[in-house]
Amino acid sequence: MLDLRGRKLAVIERGRGDALIYLHGFADVHGVAADLQPFHDRLAGVARVIAPAHPGCAGSDELGDGYGIDDVVFHYLELFDALGLEHFDLVGHCVGGWIAAELAVRHPQRVRRLALIGASGLFVPGEPIGDVFLHAQPERGVELTTLRRLLFADADAPAGLRFFPDGRGDLEEEMRRYQMLRFGSFVGFKPPYFYNRALTARLYRAAMPALVLWGEHDRMIARAHGEAYVTGLPGARALTLVKGAGHAAPLEEPEAAAQAVIDFLEGRGS
Amino acid sequence: MDNQVKLYCWHFMSYPYLPADFDTTYETGWVTVPNRLWDSEKSRGLYQEYIDQLAYADEIGFDGMVLNEHHQNIYGLMPSPNLIAAALAQKTTRGKIVILGNLLPLHLNPLRMAEEYAMLDNMSDGRLIAGFAPGSGPETFNYDVPAAPSREQFWEAVDLIRRAWTQDGPFAWEGRHYPLRYVNPWPRPTQRPHPPIWIPSSRSTETLVNIAKRGYCYFLSSRSHGSETAKSQAQFARILADHGDRFDPFRMGILLSAYVAETDAQARAEAREGVWYFLKNCLKGHLRREGRQLTAGPGIPYIAPSEFRNYLKFADPTTPLLGDAEDWSDLERSQSIIVGSPETVYRRIFDLIEHAKAGHLLIQFHMGNMADALTRKSMRLFAEQVAPRLKADSARLFARQFPELERTPEPAQ
């Protein structure tokens, strides 16, 4: 737990090598899991992975009432300064991908390489981002089938059943999910819904090498959002797909998703 | 003050023309319930029928009429309760007009609410009771209101409105959510310093503290009663004491539904259709486990994490809700919908008053698709045979429970 000018910030740090900031999503470490998962551990095999929990998540303090995406961007700049990180690789998933993109367009000189996995953040007409809040309200009080269908390739995906089981779960797991949704409500509920209309036109500033990685069956954030990132980011070549995965690709296909990121970091992939 | 319980007629104005297979065919009555089900022809005159029922309540002696704001659902057809209140201001002369309330975070500028309520207070010659609510789960989806910051936004709006009514303008409001350079509303309310302010809450400590700090009236919005209702009263009384204030029955209101007929059997026979239409259809998506309940839960994360932790510890997600009632005995247990002869209804409501110690009873008479004639007959029997006994007996009860009421020179707000 770090102290950031009086604010508590939970961070997991693992591995050695170049600094890699990992910003998490909903179905991810801090969002549903207490610790790094196999996907992140694979990254920690090649880099020094630093995975902060978003405000309000996993014991991190909230940023006060009425905060938004800009406050989160500044919050992470403070973290990077506190850790003395001038340059780093930046990997973000889901809403973490949005934050990563916002950081990269503001401070392109600090981001060596940018990897976005099923990232929200862009407004793509006709392709609205899925309503995670509505589906987080269980059916019949206990069933999360439609939430799993939104986040995973199918509602019976093992990772989905493990992290979003039907019925009242373990108290700490329920709280972790709640705090993630609360964070999401602060930064992304109000239209714009997990996007910033101005971001598309700013992407040209983030000219570092970029990977845009998407679950083949992402129903939360349509593939068109990935295509839009590829179009806008000068350092991105083509959309890379994780076969068989939905939105939560790092949980569903950790090996393939991690390999794609590692190939990119080591200069082999897109 | 006479210290008698105050009896209000609450109308939700539900949509009564759903197809018979609604429950089996449609997932919810809220937010996404397809509006092609609205029948424009059948619905001609519907608002007039409902407004007339409320005016009838005023005519036969109820203390007031209650309205509230809902959007995009079949449960309550009042996206703007203020429009109905304006009609009532013209059609009635006596009872309070209670709006419970305007959902402040759904509106761009609270000043507009301050203005409309001030207009209504003038138009009704000082009969407005001004309720404010933050809006429950369905409304955050209906109007895309972010749940997490909505409570802070709500209280800022309430504070702005009260100040707009009480402090001479123009003044500047430097709030986070609603900064305004010139606050100077015309008209000002008729009632001075301002109309009574009521705030609904379902037992949130945070909300009760905010109510106590400001001296407002607490309306317990829960639809089910029992030991929890008495606990809520005790909780509110404790919080008031912590703030140097003292509970009295007229600081608290509760909601219930009633149907009165000549005998218990006749009451059940006459109310059955309307009651189950209300439970199965209107509560689907709100207070029913069947389908997806949108009223509270993880997807509407406005509750502070510590309070949500308590909720998780003590609330069983499989417990049946009001709308899950299958028969009359389930309903009796909820103590929410009271159906019977004048004697039965008197007895059960007085029992509730004894336990809840609440001086404002907000009673729903029209339920679901209940026919106009039955609704009016039930209201009349209540007014003639139940209300007088409740009034007389509650005055004695409150005098015993709250001897200091007798010494209060001015009515409590």
Image (cartoon, helix red, strand yellow):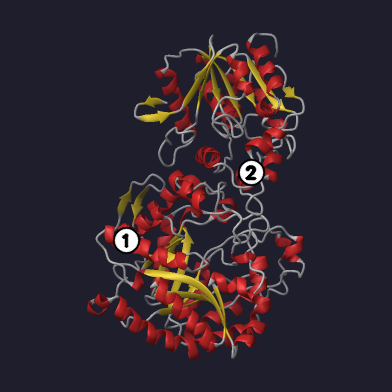
Residue depicted at x 33% and y 46%: B174
The quarter of the image holding the C terminus of chain A is top right
Residue depicted at x 73% and y 29%: A245
**Residue bearing mark 2:** A131
Q: Reply above or below: A57 against A116.
A: below
- Residue B111 placed where, x, y %? 41, 57
Please tell me whether mark 2 sits on a helix, a strand or a loop: loop
**Residue bearing mark 1:** B238
**Dot 2: few (<14), some (14–19), or many (≥20) neighbours within 10 Å?**
some
Identity, as a three-letter code, of the amino acid under mark 2: Asp
Q: Reply above or below: B268 against B79.
A: below
User: How far, Cα to Cα, is label 2 from label 1?
Assistant: 40 Å
Which label was assigned to residue B161?
A: none
> Observer-nearest residue: B101 or B165?
B101
Q: Reply above or below: B89 against A101.
A: below
The quarter of the image holding the N terminus of chain A is top left
Q: Quadrant of residue B131?
A: bottom left
- Residue B165 placed where, x, y %? 33, 62
Q: Quadrant of residue A256?
A: top right
- Both marks 2 and 1 on one chain: no
- Residue B97 placed where, x, y %? 44, 74
User: Is any part of residue B7 visible from this angle?
Assistant: yes
Identity, as a three-letter code, of the amino acid under mark 1: Arg
* Chain of the residue on which disc 2 is drawn: A
> Observer-nearest residue: A104 or A78?
A78
